[in-house]
Amino acid sequence: MFCPQCRSEYREGFTRCESCDVPLVAVLPPEAGDPSERDLVTVFETGDPGLLAMAHSILDEAQVPYLTQGEGIQDLFGVGRLGTGFNILTGPVHILVERASEAEVRQLLDGLEEDAAAHHSDDDATGDERDREPEV
């Protein structure tokens, strides 16, 4: 038996919380803010550590609460990230937010992948120029 207010546990036979003076319940209700009770949606997924760092930075700067799924296990199984950018056993990292803030977060992260792709293509072009033999 549990107190729904202070969450203290009592032995069978007790019916009221000694501290709160409320009836005990057999199962505790979920705590407020319990992530398992939130309506979360994936707003971004990637295996690219650079893109992930930029997404973290954008969301932290905007002070948007978010969760990541799979970030800590990318390099765990000895396979690493390979050419896919993510561990093929675990998949890409997912950034999740509450459904109520989904539109705002998608707008914040809009264009992140395109900007990164443009940046990489600029790097490739610069790298190609450096690798060429100088003309005489």
Image: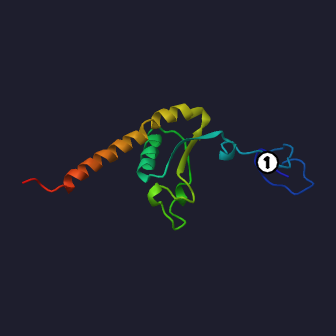
Q: Which quadrant holds the C terminus? A: bottom left
Residue 99 at what x, y percent from top left? 61, 35
Q: Residue 42 appears in which quarter of the rendering? A: top right
Q: Residue furthest bottom?
A: 78
Query: Is 20 on the left-hand or right-hand side of 103?
Result: right
How was this image coloured? rainbow
Residue at x 51% of width, y 35% of height: 105
Q: Residue furthest left?
A: 136
Query: Is 127 on the left-hand or right-hand side of 100?
Result: left
Where 117 falls versus 70 (above or below)?
Answer: above
Residue at x 26% of width, y 47% of height: 125
- Disc count in the image? 1
Query: Is 4 on the left-hand or right-hand side of 57?
Result: right
Where 22 falls versus 102 (above or below)?
Answer: below
22 vs 116, nearest the viewer: 116
Q: Pointer 1: residues within 10 angstroms few (<14), some, or many (20+)? A: some
Identified by mark 1, the residue type is Leu
3 vs 91, nearest the viewer: 91
Residue that carries the numbered disc 1 in the rendered image: 28
Q: Residue 20 appears in which quarter of the rendering? A: top right
Query: Is 73 on the left-hand or right-hand side of 82?
Result: right
Asked which secondary structure carries label 1, the reply is loop
Residue 114 at what x, y percent from top left? 40, 39
